[in-house]
Amino acid sequence: MRQPPSINSAVSGIAPISAPGRPAPGARLLLALVAIATIWLVILPALAQVSTVRTMIDRHEAHGVDPSAKFYSELPAMPMISQRVDEIRRAEPAAFGLRQP
Amino acid sequence: MEEHRPRSPWLSEDVWSIWLGWAVLLAALGATWLASAGGEKATNPLAPRLADLGSWVSNPLDAFVGKQGENVLPGVAGVFVALLALFSVGLAGMRERVRSFPLAFTLLFLLTMFAYLLAGQKVVKHYNLEYALWALTVGLLISNTIGTPAILKPAVRAEFYIKTGLVMFGAEVLFHLLLKLGPPGVFIAWVATPTTLILTYLFGQKVLKIESKSLNMVISADMSVCGVSAAIATAAACKAKKEELSLAIGISLAFTVIMMVVMPPVINWLELGPVLGGAWIGGTIDSTGAVAAAGDALGETGLMVATTVKMIQNILIGAVAFGVAMYWVTCVEKSPDGSRPSLMEIWRRFPKFVLGFIAASILFSLLSTSGAQGEAVASAATATSKTLRGWCFCLAFVSIGLETNFRELKQYLAGGKPLVLYVCGQTLNLALTLAMAWLMFTKVFPDAAASLNQ
């Protein structure tokens, strides 16, 4: 006789998780997708129109700041900042504990 | 990350991730070199053929339009074709079944695009809720509702994507940037940060007695070095479980958002100024993007100091990945009889992809310091690997979500130890970094602060 999937196989994503009294797996996924659609298509766009949030986004974009960057190389402003730091350091290397080139 | 099958090292993911990562780097370097020969400007002809999705506010279709108004779909299709070809070759090289891979990879790539789309909404993006979080969410939603469909399974290869992405990532870890701010930058980013990492790890082991050393290490590294990217590199180096990486990233992102919002007003209230405040932000907030956002709130100087300190700290990722991998194979993974492993055994256990990562870092560091032309070529060439490694990491996080469930995650939160570890480690990080920045910019190198302030 074929055994039902064990909890371990279910929790490992091998089989859908269903339990008595809970909505069917497909229905739960649909509910989650509706929640995502509501948040991303209604709530977040409305939040983006709030003046403080809009000001923050505009300021970041004007200054080349990408808050989702994971590394310095992903920051649009980094080449300009790097160049500016080089100029400052070259102008006064002793201030940074470096010798004259 | 754990590898399941004991096989010949030449057929392992570690070795094939090096081949694939280096194939991308060499192709990009070669194409850039050829296209730039005789010209004044370095151009990478491969770069426009690959693209990320853009950002949007209320219409998700805006994500398919680039910054210059161009359609990014061909670029995304280019990424898909390039990665499908790369990983198919990799699987064939590892003597694994390739036939069912293309369809599975296509579906996984569509899920990854969906995660990128969620991360591209501007409110989400500007509050530093990175794609890693949404990629995990997309995977978790599927695995915890309908279960991961069998058709997707051949492409669920989180470790392979992470290792390949990390080898490409090595090209962006440029060691010469270490001296960008001279000794003050070195002391803030390369003395305070490793000290915090080591002390936090010891606190987790000796005081909190966290059962999983790899979870302790991943949280300590992502909190003290640079968030998600450090977590990915360290987790791969210490063979952490996927759930441990997910948990560490979740905690890090939650605290990063809080610190990004709270630190600028606190710095203004304490009247630390943009140099000291910027250095404090750069040395403590996990994510590079959040550092820039918080530094920007302090003004132009704050942004400059914060991002430069963070950039110097970013470079530490190479040393940390290598150090953690060495520590793990020599001290943590003991031999069955408890004796120290021999050199051969260390070599056998060592995660080889770390060598590919370090070699890429060394080559691109040397190229960047070989003159203006070399720097321009290195910078143009990394445009290709930067796009591809971002997609690799996103594919990996969707895969991790597809292999994880909420109950497994819950067991790691038992007793709230990971949260306590993060909070205590971050408190130490805040104190140590502020003390070091204060010492450097007010006592030892006050003229450096004055120069940066001008």
Image (cartoon, coloured by chain):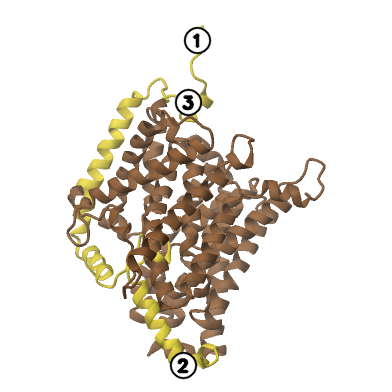
Chain colours: A yellow, B brown
Question: Residue B381's image quarter?
Answer: bottom left
Residue that badge 3 annotates: A10
Mark 1 or mark 3, which has the lower sequence index?
A: 1
> Residue A93's x, y, as percent?
49, 91
Would you say the residues marked 1 and 3 are in contact, meaning their CB atoms lie under 8 Å apart? Answer: no
Which residue is at the front of the view, B285 or B305? B305
Q: CA distance from mark 3 to mark 2?
A: 64 Å
Label 2 resides on the chain identified as: A
Would you say the residues marked 3 and 2 are in contact, meaning their CB atoms lie under 8 Å apart? Answer: no
Which residue is at the front of the view, A14 or B169? B169
Please state which amino acid type lies under the numbered disc 1.
Answer: Arg
Q: Residues within 10 Å of mark 3 (few under 14, many from 20)?
A: many
**Residue A2: which disc?**
1
> Could you tell me which residue is drawn at 55 percent across and 42 percent down?
B13
How many numbered discs? 3
**Residue A92: which disc?**
2
Mark 1 or mark 2, which has the lower sequence index?
A: 1
Whether discs 1 and 2 lie on one chain: the answer is: yes
Which residue is at the front of the view, B345 or B306? B345
> Could you tell me which residue is drawn at 56 percent across and 84 percent down?
B439
Whether discs 1 and 3 lie on one chain: the answer is: yes
